[in-house]
Image: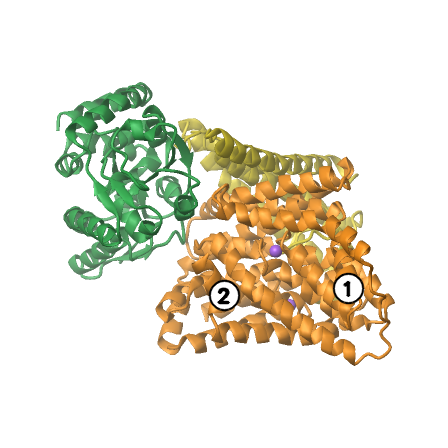
Chain colours: A orange, B green, C yellow
Amino acid sequence: METLLILAALFALLLIGVPVAFALGGLGLMLLAFGGFSPLMAPAGILSSMDNFVLVSVPLFLLMANVMLKGGVGKDLFAALQAWVGHLPGGLAVATILACGVFAAISGSSVATAATIGTVAIPEMTKRGYPRHFTFGVLAAGGTLGILIPPSLIMIIYGVITEESVLALFIAGVGPGLLMIVFFIIYSILYARTLPSLERIAKATWEERWSSGVRALPTVALAVFVIAGIYRGWYTPTEAAAIGFAGALFVTGVVLRTLSLRDLWDAVVGSMKTTAVILLIVAGAKVFGKAIALYRIPQDVSAFISTNIDSAGLFILVVALVLLVMGLFMESLSLLLIMVPVLAGSLMPLGIDPIWFGVFFVIMVECALITPPVGLNLYVIQAVGKGTLTEVARGVLPFLALMLLTVLVITIFQDIVLWLPFHL
Amino acid sequence: ETTLRITLQLPLKSHLGQNLLYFKEEVEKISEGDVSVEIYDSAQLYKDKEVPDAVGSGQIEAGVASLTTYVGEIPAVDVFYMPFLLNSEEKVRAAVAAGSPVRTLIDDAIAETGANVLWWQAYGTVILLSNDAPIKTPDEMKGKKVRVFGKTLGQWVQAVGGVPTLISGSEQFLAYQRGTVDVGMTGVSGVQSRSLWDVMDTITRVNVADIEFIVVINQDYWEGLSEQEQMWINEAATRAQERVRDEMSNIEAKAYSDAEANGMAIYDPTPEEIEAWKTASQPVIDTWLKEAGDLGQKVYDAAKSL
Amino acid sequence: MTGGGPVAWVANALAVVAAVLLFLIGAMLTYEVVARYFFNAPTIWAEELSRLFLTWAVFLASAALLRSNDHIRVTVLLDLMPRPAKKVAHVTSLTFVAVIAGLVAWHGFPTVAKSFATGRSSGSMLDIPQWWSQAAIPLCFGLLSLQALILTVSTVCGGWDPFDYDHKGDERPLTD
Ligand code: NA
Ligand code: NA
């Protein structure tokens, strides 16, 4: 009962437009006051939530991606992939999905990936006769690869909440990320065959392929360097983000020479905004989390689950359904920050690997990002492609189904997630 | 009816968590349910280093903090980190026994921060981890990057010729596995709980310092309790302290045998090697004595005479 | 991000400071890696200062982001409301932010004062005073509260248009 009242209050605050960070933190503070707990817990929690070295990687991965973005890397990537696969049936859609996948490897954010690739791919795809809703769907869904393929801001925050290794989470995302790319590509090729009016692109010459490939190469090299360096012990995962930022400056400033000082400043300011917006929500959620822990809600939920759900499969099914529904209305970060602490206690008794659960959770967050009415990727693609929410929402439906199929496959074959982190 | 909430950074299954659980059962038994205890484990409410302020300011009634979290306010607490000063179980037991001069001086200083110490929890001694060969003397530390977790131990690594490198507990495994640092430093129970034997093959039982945790209770809250309640809590605290000390030797023995079973070699430095360590470490003690003032000198003398 | 009186000016200037702090974090940690890997000389300050800078950067930027409507919010219901109802909702939520931020600042102050008086330090390798980070709470949330209050008043009086929040496209900070 208490739990339902708290949820209702939270939704009421969110729906009248209180910024998420303040809705969570404010409700937390009110709960502390009503429960007779010390209000000093609020400032202490807010401060302590930022005092975490792993979180330092959030602004740095953002800086890396934003510098690459300002350096025009999205355009280069798309051009190269178009030259290599654009002439095939459905080739432009395939090039778009692959470009999302590669950009995801330097960007920790879904929305940044969707916006960057969307800006170059949407005009090209619609010009060649792809239906608008399909084009929007490819990009909104392809963009979500940004948080599944490492680096990933959502995985960093999951790692901070659960104290799991961020590197293990990163590596665990690779298998499912590739699987999802394959699903998206197969669907796109099949779909393109139903479109007789689709304009075929002339095959690029080898010279074009090589020259565009060479321009895209530094980006791929940077992505590999960042992850490989952690593996070689050159730097910790947090430091890797700083190296990624420095590397991005090197690639765009020295190698490609596409970054002006003005661009750099814009990238820094953009990263600052996103960092503050995201981490303030993390801080608000910390206060909320402390308050509900003192009301013993996570403890009660764990007890409820352990008496009513005795199999891992049933637990995952129920959690997936709950997240799918909550994801319709909730912004992805709060979904993570509210649900993970409540569910984390049930993983061990049920024998669910926390790294696997992290990847599962990230894919459910990806679903939340593309389901209306609240889905940041929908908004971004709508704005970039100048379409309507309905068009985008219609376009993402098949991709949503493919994401859920991915969830099903990784639930049955858990090694797709866990083999890499345990064998590298 | 009184509820006592205790915050703990470690999970309930850790030996400190189990010790709290024991305390909870004892209090609730002795008081026949008049005093109930709620444990908030796994840093749900506070991280270790936030506990002194949280308990001192009355945000929560009680908490478990590692002793060294008080060093920013009371430099003297790092007497337990003074190299080779309290390097045997007998000395540590004598130092933390209720009424011992070392413990009384420190408990009184902590009382100034608004918290009373209920009992001391043993956590074990500091060991070094390495690969291929033990760290027998300061010579083997020369120029090596050593994981540290705090100021005093950092200064010690520097004094004996190593390069102190801050690595958090959760990044430890990775830093050893990937060679970000060459030498590890932790309590032996950390080897077990984080499976560090997968990445390091040698333990040097250098016993350079002793890690202590304390359970503190807010003073105003304490004074607001009835005398009867205070007695019940003290009684249970005394039992919990005895139990965790007795258990600690078993826990350490088990951790060492688990480490050996998982392929680790354990090395005990010879008395001559320990002398070499002591000589090289002296500057740390000198610096600390200057910073820790009168109180530091008093606890140091008290500890030395044990 | 121009105009809007002295509070807005301060908020914007602090947002610039926040951006610079983040850039410095990148520089410090890159230096740390190079110093450790090539010169076997890790610093004792890079890790701790980067946490300190992050703390300040996030809270310093918050007030300016309130004014530029960059904080993430759910606008589904607002989008359906007629303009007067929207205005009521907006005034309510801004007032809520002002009160909450004010309370956080108020309750955050005693801790800073105590740390300052006792000279409590972090006890880490760098051993910086604790109030260096704690001071961010009363200062930044105080400013945030003030900014929210001013925006509440100017929404009521019609000086500030709170309705340009939806679907800012490229302007929107690229979150998750
Ligand atoms: Na990514
Ligand atoms: Na959604």
Task: Identify which residue, B60 or C14, lies in the foreground.
Answer: C14
Which quadrant contains ligand 1?
Answer: bottom right
Q: Is mark 1 within 8 Å of ligand 2?
A: no
| Residue drawn where x is 78% and y is 51% of the image | A211
The amino acid beneath tag 1 is Gln
Q: Nearer the viewer, residue A373 or A200?
A: A200
At x 50% / y 57%, what residue is drawn?
Answer: A169
The subunit carrying tag 1 is A
Q: In this image, C35 relative to A64: left or right?
A: left
Marks 2 and 1: which is nearer the front? Answer: 2
Alpha-carbon span between mark 2 and mark 1: 32 Å
Helix, strand, or loop for circle 2?
helix
Q: Amino acid at mark 2?
A: Val
Residue at 21 percent across and 23 percent down: it is: B298
Disc number at residue A69? none
Return the mark for residue A382. 1
Which chain hosts label 2? A
Q: Position of residue C67 (x, y in %)?
A: 71, 46
- The residue at the far front in this view is A206
Give the percent coordinates (x, y) of residue B178. 43, 45
